[in-house]
Image: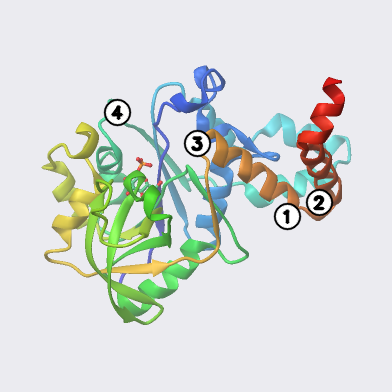
Amino acid sequence: MKRVRKAVFPVAGLGTRFLPATKSIPKEMLTVVDRPVIQYVVDEARKAGIEHFIFVTGRNKGVIEDHFDLQFELNETLAQRGKTTQLDFLKTLQPEPGQTSFTRQQVPLGLGHAVWCARDLVGEEPFALLLPDMIMQTDKSCLSDMVELYEETGGNIIAVQECDPAEAHKYGIVGRGKDVHDGFEITGMVEKPKPGTAPSNLYINGRYILQPQIFGILAKQERGTGNEIQLTDAMLKLEKTQRFYGYHYRGSTFDCGSPEGFVEANIAFALARPEMRASVLGMLERLIADLDPRKAMQAAE
Ligand code: G1P
């Protein structure tokens, strides 16, 4: 069985929910505490043993490429000023030369189309797909667990989590079959089901391990939900000839594609930083106390 060495990051989205911030800054470069959203996702992939990082970008996304490049002048300045802690930290995040590739999704035709744009860069091997809107908070990465499951089962793996049934229409939802190792057989998938029609409350959380045969299907894929080329529809076709397993991830996931999820991620990641925890907790307590209606009335009197 071929190892999962490559990961695809579709980063071409316009980020309209974050305007005006995203007029000139890609949404993937917005920071959660002090690192861009995309950095969390790339770090998750690196922890899972990924060696090649493929970004499907678009216009106005050049700064993502700069971010993963070596900033020679910055490193020299930090070295001259003796700022070794920062320098060493930056080095831990730095991809080696040749470990990154960038291609462009020229037209926004949907997630399936974005993945298809990476076909030549991936080639004939299984690959991980990480949707950068979703960032996860656990010691061991979600993708690491999926790679372990993949080494037992082969096939295709999709990570899922439970959602409120009222939210199911926002996601891809899978049906759950019998348990296999730490995962389960997937018995069906539906993208953005109409209210009341979801096969379960297990939603696709944005982490996949896929076989390269998905590209041949995507090449012929018709438009689906939202008039876009949907990855879920292509996976449904691949399911006819290949096995699909679900991995039930139980850590915390933050949907940084929505402003509320982004704010929650900032609070959660700040609280997880020992040097910030006490001061951020204090700030939150003060802000919550200020919301107390009696206080608001007193202030108004
Ligand atoms: C995409 C996928 C969907 C998945 C979701 C996770 O939808 O198509 O299956 O549940 O990501 O964020 P999008 O968020 O692009 O609408």
Q: CA distance from mark 3 to mark 2?
A: 24 Å
Could you say where residue 192 lies in the image, as x and y percent from the top left?
Answer: 28, 46
| Mark 1–mark 2 CB contact (< 8 Å) | yes
Label 2: how many Cα within 10 Å (few below 14, some 14–19, many 20+): some
| Cβ of mark 2 under 8 A from ligand 1 | no
Q: Which residue is mark 2?
A: 277
Q: Which comes sooner in the sequence, label 4 or label 3?
A: 4
Q: CA distance from mark 1 to mark 4?
A: 36 Å
Could you say where residue 254 lies in the image, as x and y percent from the top left?
Answer: 54, 48
Label 3: how many Cα within 10 Å (few below 14, some 14–19, many 20+): some
| Mark 4–mark 2 CB contact (< 8 Å) | no
Of the residues shown, which amino acid type is indicated by label 1?
Ala
Q: Give the residue displayed 38% in from the left and 49% down from the top.
A: 166
| Cβ of mark 3 under 8 A from ligand 1 | no
The quarter holding residue 75 reads top right
Q: Which comes sooner in the sequence, label 4 or label 2?
A: 4
Q: CA distance from mark 1 to mark 2?
A: 7 Å
Quick check: can you spot residue 65? no
Left or right: 178, with 259 as reference point: left
The quarter holding residue 224 reads top left
Q: Which residue is mark 4?
A: 108
Number of numbered labels in the structure image = 4
Q: Is residue 80 above or below residue 280?
A: above
Q: Give the residue displayed 81% in from the left and 27% down from the top.
A: 297
Of the residues shown, which amino acid type is indicated by label 2?
Arg
Front position among marks 1 and 3: 3
Q: Which residue is mark 1?
A: 272
Q: Which residue is mark 3?
A: 258
Ligand 1 located in image quadrant: top left
User: Which image quarter holds the C terminus?
Assistant: top right
